């Protein structure tokens, strides 16, 4: 929810403030939504701020006087006249948190430029120096734009730097989109729908909200919720008897299939709508019933009848029906988004296909496609139902079919906490790649049921994927590193500045007739870096890391890392297929070699990223 609010709601708000609409479809409804300028009597002004008054200071030392920002909002960035200080064409802000918790900052969707973002402690106004550790930093997260997140403390200030990737020298204008998770989240749009689990009661309050659109199932001051069905059958949303004392009572409820949206408009079908239920004792409350399919997600829109008083209170969701387990890998349930996703292995059989890290019985299978490249955590830690068994086993396999290889991630016990028998795994997922998730109970233990989640480090997922990944990562430094310097899942072996290791990925299209493939490496020292191509996969100790690309090797090109990142090809370079002499449809392997600190691990003073395999097409 944080990510979709950050990437969509604030970006749409900025477009609206600029006199633009978020989509053609939205133009047929009310005008684009803006923050309320006058809150109801006695209510505080919402903290969301849109600022066009500054574009950042040209250096860190001037930021405290010229570029102070605070809280959640959208803040103007202008580096068109910026000079290069700590980073290429960098502009600086002093940002002050208004709430405790994780803060997300991004430039997504507000500029076509190739950006960098950094966060540093304020330290009483002492500016960071080259090589100082940052709280967060990022190059590419949403296309060529950047997203960072870090833990903030209310009232504490931080330095924020927005810069250009080396080689992008024209500067840019953009909006820095800031969302604090500790700030009030009102789920005012479908894009920021609040995730809810179970029957409730679930709280709502539309007194400070705006109206998404006018159309079928008309209402005002609507609030949005995302809910997942745990049974195949019928669900009923009810506000009857839930209004707080002194609140209005005239509600309207609408339900949409799926959680997709385009601008301000849900893309799923309207499956239920109710104004006044007519039920005895319900008065002007609403009751909306609709057919459900286990594991499917639904958007619930709850508002007040047009012209009626604002409503605050609780609503409930009652389910009836049956649960049919996804009993084999061949009948795996397709799941999307981050969940919660229901599971119940009470009546499940045991599928003998695929190995796991511990004996697993009564398993269920789920097929999930990554909506972006990110570090992914699959967890049942907080989702077990009352009286459920607690000893689970969880495995993830690469590919959309029944697995023929070992899992890429697997956990039995201690994934959630020491001594805890419930499971959690993490792995690096590639945008557009499909994975099979197998969740069962440890053999001969009590059945387990509840919900699990699929969460990315960058927050909640937006619908869809920018583009299918041109390849997949392999050969990770999670074991076998020369000095025990094992890295994080998805990366190479740990290096002198980054114990998680460096990461290599790709974007674009691997087509011989239209080659736009770009190889991107991150998490390295600011040193020289060599991109090279192989014809086979390997995993052997080499320098401070692992050699992953072998066979007939071709050097693609050398780069110098900036902020730990680089890429091939850059401006002026020939394409990967031309430099690598790829002339026919075939698979090639890629890796980045880079200089490491003297005597960090071995005497070799170099390390490598993970490997990246690409299937070239005509």
Image: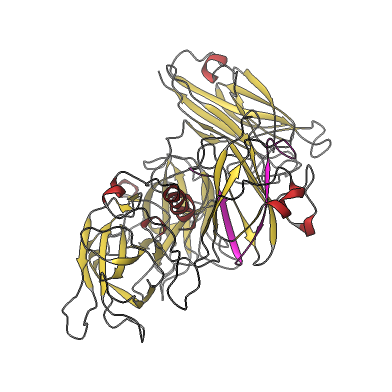
Tell me if residue 98 is in the magenta stretch. Answer: yes
Q: Residue at x 40, y 52 (%)?
A: 337
Q: Is residue 167 above or below residue 223?
A: above
Q: In the image shown, does 228 or 240 lie closer to the viewer?
A: 240
Q: Is residue 594 left or right of residue 282?
A: right
User: How far across and how far down the image is residue 215, in percent?
Assistant: 23, 58
Q: Is residue 513 above or below residue 32?
A: above
Q: Residue at x 77, y 47 (%)?
A: 132
Q: Is residue 229 visible?
A: no
User: How far across and how far down the image is residue 378, in percent?
Assistant: 48, 55
The quadrant the N terminus occupies is bottom left
Q: Is residue 276 left or right of residue 344?
A: left
Task: Give the image quarter of residue 599.
Answer: top right
Q: How is the image coloured?
A: secondary structure
Q: Is residue 265 above or below residue 473?
A: below
- Number of marks present in the image shown: 0
Tell me if residue 420 is in the magenta stretch. Answer: no
User: How far across and how far down the image is residue 220, in percent?
Assistant: 30, 66
Q: In the image shown, does 19 or 605 lie closer to the viewer?
A: 19
Q: Residue at x 41, y 72 (%)?
A: 388
Q: Is residue 108 visible?
A: yes
Task: Give the image quarter of residue 567.
Answer: top right
Q: Which residues are magenta?
A: 83-109
Task: Give the image quarter of residue 568.
Answer: top right
């Amino acid at each position: 929810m944080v990510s979709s609010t950050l990437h969509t709601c604030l970006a749409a708000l900025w477009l609206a403030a600029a006199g633009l609409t978020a989509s053609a479809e939205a133009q047929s409804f009310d005008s684009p939504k803006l923050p309320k300028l006058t809150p109801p009597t006695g209510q505080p002004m919402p903290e969301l701020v849109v600022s066009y008054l500054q574009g950042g200071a040209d250096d860190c030392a001037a930021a405290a006087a010229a570029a102070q920002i605070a809280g959640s909002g959208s803040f103007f960035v202008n580096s068109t006249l910026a000079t290069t200080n700590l980073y290429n064409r960098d502009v600086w802000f002093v940002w002050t948190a208004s709430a405790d918790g994780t803060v997300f900052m991004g430039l997504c969707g507000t500029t076509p430029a190739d950006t960098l973002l950094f966060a540093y402690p304020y330290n009483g106004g002492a500016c960071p120096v080259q090589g100082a550790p940052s709280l967060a930093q990022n190059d590419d997260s949403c296309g060529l734009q950047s997203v960072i997140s870090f833990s903030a403390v209310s009232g504490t200030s931080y330095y924020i730097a927005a810069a250009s990737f080396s080689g992008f020298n024209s500067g840019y204008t953009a909006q820095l989109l800031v969302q604090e998770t500790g700030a009030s989240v009102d789920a005012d749009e479908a894009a920021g729908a609040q995730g809810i689990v179970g029957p409730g009661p679930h709280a709502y309050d539309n007194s400070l909200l705006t109206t998404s659109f006018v159309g079928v199932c008309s209402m005002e001051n609507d609030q949005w919720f995302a809910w997942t069905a745990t049974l195949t059958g019928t669900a009923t949303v009810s506000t009857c008897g839930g209004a707080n004392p002194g609140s209005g009572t005239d509600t309207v409820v609408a339900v949409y299939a799926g959680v997709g949206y385009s601008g301000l408009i849900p893309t799923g079908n309207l499956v239920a709508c109710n104004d006044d239920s007519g039920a005895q004792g319900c008065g002007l409350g609403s009751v909306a019933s609709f057919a459900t399919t286990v594991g499917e997600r639904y958007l619930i829109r709850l508002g007040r009848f047009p012209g009626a008083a604002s409503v605050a209170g609780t609503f409930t969701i009652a389910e009836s029906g049956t649960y049919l387990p996804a009993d084999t890998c061949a009948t795996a349930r397709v799941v999307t988004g981050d969940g919660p996703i229901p599971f119940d292995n009470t009546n499940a059989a045991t599928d003998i296909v695929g190995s796991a890290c511990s004996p697993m019985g009564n398993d269920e299978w789920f097929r999930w496609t990554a909506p972006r490249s990110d570090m992914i955590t699959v967890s049942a830690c907080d989702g077990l139902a009352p009286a459920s068994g607690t000893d689970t086993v969880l495995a993830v396999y690469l590919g959309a079919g029944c697995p023929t290889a070992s899992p890429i991630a697997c956990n039995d016990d201690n994934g959630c906490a020491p001594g805890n028998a419930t499971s959690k795994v993490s792995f690096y997922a590639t945008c557009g790649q499909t994975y099979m998730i197998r969740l069962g109970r440890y053999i001969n233990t009590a059945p387990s049921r509840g919900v699990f989640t699929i969460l990315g480090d960058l927050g909640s997922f937006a619908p869809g994927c920018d583009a299918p990944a041109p390849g997949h990562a392999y050969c990770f430094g999670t074991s076998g590193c020369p000095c025990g310097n094992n890295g994080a899942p998805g990366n190479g072996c740990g290096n002198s500045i980054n114990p998680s290791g460096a990461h290599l990925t790709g974007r674009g299209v691997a087509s011989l007739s239209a080659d736009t493939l770009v190889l991107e490496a991150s998490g390295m020292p600011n040193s020289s870096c060599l991109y090279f191509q192989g014809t086979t996969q390997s995993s052997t100790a080499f320098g401070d890391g692992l050699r992953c690309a072998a066979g007939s090797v071709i050097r693609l090109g050398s780069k110098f890392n900036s902020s730990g990142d680089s890429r091939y090809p850059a401006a002026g370079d020939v394409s990967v297929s031309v430099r690598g002499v790829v002339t026919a449809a075939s698979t090639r392997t890629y890796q980045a070699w880079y200089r490491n600190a003297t005597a960090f691990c071995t005497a070799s003073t170099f390390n490598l990223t993970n490997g990246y395999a690409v299937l070239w097409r005509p």
